[in-house]
Amino acid sequence: MPKPGVYRSPWRDFPDVVIQTTVTKLRSRPGYDQAKRGEGDAAYHVVQELIKPEKIPFEIDIIVPVMQFDRDKPNALPLVYATALAKHFDAYLEIGVRQVNVVSHTFADAQTRILGQPMFMGKIQPGSRVLIVDDVVTYGSTLANLRGWLQQQGATVVGATTLAAGFGGTKLALPDIVRNRLLDRFPTQAEALANELGFSADCFTNREARFLAGLKNEHEMQRLIVAAQELTLLQERQASLGRTNEIDPPSHPC
Amino acid sequence: MLACAMSSSDKLKLPEIRFLTPQENQQLTDLAKDIARQMLGPDWKERQEQRRAAFSAKTVQQ
């Protein structure tokens, strides 16, 4: 198993994220806040009202939820959604894979989302066809890194599903036109930022790249690179102080 | 540009990132098992293991 870190794979023809509803409808459900704070019963009621498993067209062996802490509570929504899908598809539910760092993305701005890259740990069966599951996709960093972590171990992530998506969030794969716009605007800095985060510029998600391509000037990009360098150092220091089992700095560009 | 070459007033505020504690890791496991037990039934673990074994056998054959 690779060491926990940031891993991403080239997107190739990765399909759009399958969603069940809009973010507004999801957040307006009674019990949504409790579900985000780890209450399984509340999450069950939210998910039961929303899901139509038949929307998911993939052949699946294993379902992997994003198991994460959001601030100081575990998020029950991805777990309940993934469990409901495992039941429907008679698939294996993998609960040993989880996010090892706590990066609160809920209501976070774009810079925070891009700098705060989730890292994962936990084994997956090589050769398996995997569906990854989260509650909401916005910039796609979490799903991109979970996909990378699983594919690094020889699994094939055939698709992703969330209960809802932020605007433009369902398209994870980076279109050539967006990639080229980013690299035209910031020819060296886009790759430098990606490397600092742990991957290559081809592995940005569509929304990450769109945000970066829209930065005002090189100085704005430079500020992000410097912040990414500082975060890497900070996490190395935390790791050396034993704040996690075996976190390594990002080291696997795709 | 190295981090030290940028003035501190010009730097971005870093997001708060920390590592999962062992207690939080256990909380995640407990929550996942609890949800699985309630939604998949009390014998979910055994059935999961059967599924895993069947899948492993299939991949070995291939």
Image: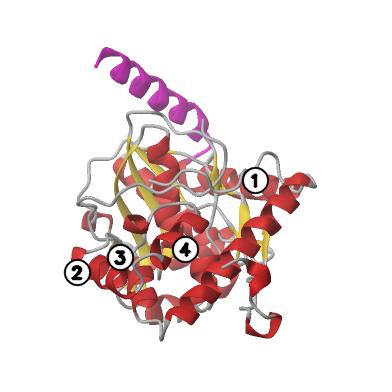
Residue A173 position in % (x across, y down): 27, 59
Mark 1, secondary structure of its residue: helix
Select label 1 or label 4 by which is in front: 4
Residue found 30% across the figure and 49% down from its top:
A10
In this view of the protein, which residue sits in the foreground, B3 or A17?
Answer: B3
Q: Left or right: A205 with respect to A196?
A: left
Q: Please tell me if label 3 and label 1 are on a single chain.
A: no
Badge 3 density bin: few <14, some 14–19, many ≥20, Cα 10 Å: many
Disc 3 target residue: A19
Residue found 34% across the figure and 67% down from its top:
A187
Mark 4, secondary structure of its residue: helix
Q: Mark 1 is on which residue type?
A: Asp
Residue found 46% across the figure and 50% down from its top:
A65
Q: Which residues make up the magenta segment? A: B41-62
Residue A45 position in % (x across, y down): 47, 65
Mark 2 vs 4, N-terminal side: 2
Q: Would you say residue A106 is visible in this rendering? A: no
Q: Please tell me if label 2 and label 1 are on a single chain.
A: no
